[in-house]
Structures are given as structure tokens and as C-alpha cells.
Amino acid sequence: MATIFVNNPGNLSNPSQIQRLNKLVNEMESLPESWGSSSTNYFIRDLSDFLGEESLNDLNNGSINEFLKWPENKHWKAFVRTDGENGTLKRFFFTTAYHGERLKEWAERANLQNKWRDIIDKYNDLNATVFNDEGLFLDLINNMPTDAWQSALATLICMTTICALFMGGEWRTVILAGITIGSIILGTLGILAWMDITMDPIMMAALVISIGFSIDIPAHVSYHFYSSGFDLPKPINKNDRHSFLNQRLTTTLLAVGIPALQAAISTSFCVLALLLVPLYMAQIFVKIMFSCIILCVIHSLILIPALIVLSDGILWNLFLLCHNTESVPNSIES
């Protein structure tokens, strides 16, 4: 339902002014989603029937007051504001309804609201505005993609900074933790797009909550791997390095693996219980949280250890390459 307030209707005794008002109403009714004139509450149509087409052209200040005095027209008093006894029309509003299967989606309703505003903007002389009960939320739709990536980026930067403060002695772990958190966020957004879930206020709220949840397990795994290096003897050669890495990963997974799985399973059961409630809000929250939990477990308990092993081999080869490069000039000088 669209409610259009006309704050400067002009002089209704001028036929061209009434034609302009009618043109505004007709444009609002011409949209594909409109119910048509049968859904429109527009007092000038009843005024035209009351006065007749010829009398409408000779409309004077007292005509509207006379029209409103009749019992069958009293409901129009709520739609118009006149200048007291003078009867001059100061402002009025009309309503018209819209429907459509596509309007179930928030994004489609936001697009429809933008169409209303485009039409209203053509009639600046009427000082018209359009109101919709959902307008406050629909205005957020266009900003939500920007808000979503800004929230995700801010979360990633903050968590990477915190990891750097507490694990700055091992930058590999810090970088891998940041990559993992970013991958979980992107994966969650990708799954939502694959499930054809559109951006709306409910989805945005659930997404922000899931982004916070995606930090938990990767941060625990990364920190336990970092702290495990203090309790073990440092490696001397390549074989010792492999053994040292295996011990660190074993210690980390034994300390974090089972609790992480327990947390993921218990949270999943709590979230899945919302499916018993036939609400759009509950279904969206379950889909987002369940996707985030699965990605979080896979990344934390499988991907992070795999990346650590892969990066360890790369770093060791780079170390050997740099060491051999430095030893060659020394052998030449001797």
C-alpha cells in the first residue's frame, strides 16, 4: 500500500490543475504491480461524481465543504485538509494498493518503492511525498551490500590485528588465521547466493551474528598451534622440523578438536530447533548459521592444519635457498 501526500494541490478551480493531479494518480496506477483504480482512495473521483463533470470545471471554495457534509462522503474528511470555513483545499492524500508474487522479496518491494519515488519526483510543483509502512526498512536494502562487505572487512581487519598482537612471533599463523576467517565469510556469502537468498534486514542481522561466530574456532586453533611451540624443543634439521610440526599439530588438535566439534554440534542442534517455527526469520537464521558452522569446522580442523603443513615445506625450502645463496659467496672468497 502506497500513501501519497499532496502538500500543494494548487487551485482546483483550474481544470488543468485537476488534470495534473489525475495524471499523478494514473501514473501510480499504471505500474505493473498495481491493483488498478479499484484499490485507489482518491477523493476527487467521488467529488467529480458528486458535482458532475461540468460542475467540476466550475469548482469553488465552498464545493468541497458541501461535498464533505453529505453522510456518504464524510469518510473523505480524513483524507483532506481545508482552510476552515473558506473551504480552500490545503493538502490531501490518496492511497493505492499493489500486489504480486515477486513482492514477497524485500528487494522487489524496495524496487517498487523506488518506482513510486521516480513518479513523485516528476511532480515537484505538487510537493508530493510517498509513505509506506515498510519504507524505513526498504531504504536499508540498497545500502545492505555495502554494509555487509564493510562489516566483513572490519571483522577481518580487527581479528587479524588481534592475532598479530597475541601471535606476532609467528606471522605465518597470523596470516593463515586471517585467510581462514576471510574464506569462511566469503563461503557463507557464496552459499547464501547459491540458495538464492536475497539481502534483507533479517538476513543482514543473521549474517552479522554468523560473522562473529566464524571467528571463534579458527582463533582457538591458531592460538593453540602458536602456544604449542613454546613447550617443545626447537628443531635442528629437516627431520626434527617434521617431527616438531607433527607434535605441534597433534597437541593443537587434541586440545581444540573435540571441544570445537562439541561446540559445533551443540550449536547446530540449538539452531536447528528453530525450524520447528514456520517463520521466514527462523529459516534464514538456520540456513546462515548452519552454513557458517560447517564451514568453520572444515576450515579450522582440516584447512588450517593442511595450510600449516604446506606452508612449512615452502618456508623450509626458502630457508635452504637463502642459506645456500649466502654460503656461495663465502666459499668463493675463501
Image: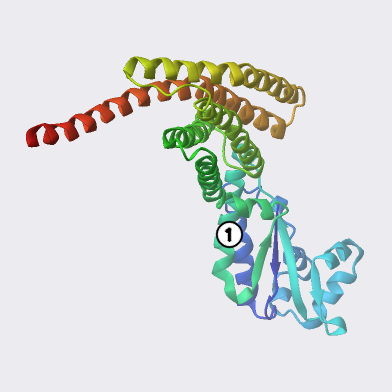
- Judged from this view, the residue extending furthest toward the right is 71
Q: Nearer the viewer, residue 32 or 60?
A: 32
Q: Secondary structure at mark 1?
A: helix
Q: Above or below — where is 70 with respect to 263?
A: below
Q: Residue at x 51, y 34 (%)?
A: 181
In the image, taking residue 37 as reference, residue 334 lies left or right, namely left
Residue 235 position within the rendered picture, expressed as x and y whole percent measured from the top left: 39, 21
Residue 267 position within the rendered picture, expressed as x and y whole percent measured from the top left: 70, 24
- Judged from this view, the residue extending furthest toward the front is 334
Residue 260 position within the rendered picture, expressed as x and y whole percent measured from the top left: 62, 21
Q: Specify the amino acid type for callout 1.
A: Glu
Residue 206 position within the rendered picture, expressed as x and y whole percent measured from the top left: 65, 37
Q: Nearer the viewer, residue 187 or 49?
A: 187
Q: Nearer the viewer, residue 74 or 3?
A: 3
Q: Above or below — where is 126 with respect to 98?
A: below
Q: Above or below — where is 39 with respect to 216?
A: below
Q: Residue at x 43, y 37 (%)?
A: 171
Q: Residue at x 70, y 33 (%)?
A: 280
Q: Nearer the viewer, residue 215 or 293?
A: 215
Q: Residues within 10 Å of mark 1 (few under 14, many from 20)?
A: few
Q: Above or below — where is 96 with respect to 13?
A: above
Write down the residue under mark 1: 27
Tell me the quarter of the picture where residue 76 sits.
Answer: bottom right
Tell me the quarter of the picture where residue 118 sits.
Answer: bottom right
Tell me the quarter of the picture where residue 257 sits.
Answer: top right
In the image, taking residue 215 as reference, residue 246 lies left or right, namely left
Colour setup of the view: rainbow
